[in-house]
Amino acid sequence: MLEKQEKRKRRHKKVRTKISGTSKVPRLCIFKSNKYIYVQLIDDEKGKTILSSDDLKLKKTKTKAKTSSSSGKVGLAREVGKIIAEKAVKKGIKNIVFDRSGYKYHGRVKALAEGAREGGLKF
């Protein structure tokens, strides 16, 4: 298991040498655990997080409501993408750089990216 994490970190490091975010075009960075998914918009020039979102609150409200139109973790990831996009558009951010953090572009990562695109972000 540790080897898998080390490989992901190595891939992430390699990608991070090529991409970085600015205040006008921030970097959308993802972290996914087994239960949750977290996303941040980061300005790498200043070293500041502009916005962040996760599915912690969404998961709690979905389990209470029991009316889930989305299917499990993938659906929640899509909703997190839409939420971060709405927040970014309110702040005047339309263009971003997508950082998948060494994860494969499928499943929850792909759903989050599609949700962000649906919300109005361009990348």
Image (cartoon, grey):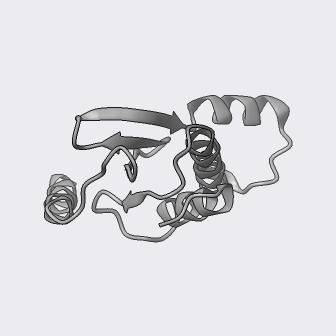
Q: Nearer the viewer, residue 7 or 23?
A: 23
Where in the figure is residue 96, as x and y percent of width and height? 43, 57
Drawn side of residue 109 relative to residue 64, left or right: left
Q: Is residue 86 above or below residue 102?
A: above
Residue at 64%, 48% in the rendered image = 76
Residue 52 vs residue 48: left or right?
A: right
* Residue occupying image coordinates x 42% and y 41%: 40
**Residue 64 picture location, percent across and down:** 79, 28
In the picture, measured across the screen, residue 50 lies left or right of residue 55, that is left
Q: Nearer the viewer, residue 82 or 95?
A: 95
List x then y, in percent, for residue 6: 14, 56
Residue in view at x 63 percent, y 55 percent: 78
Q: Position of residue 10 (x, y in %)?
A: 13, 61
Determine whether, in the image, residue 7 is placed left or right of residue 71. Answer: left
Instruction: Tell me if residue 21 comes above or below residue 53 in the rendering.
Output: below
Check the picture and name the quadrant holding the N terminus: bottom left
Q: Which residue is at the front of the view, 77 or 23?
A: 23
In this figure, what is the number of numbered marks?
0
- Residue plotted at (65% across, 44% down): 86
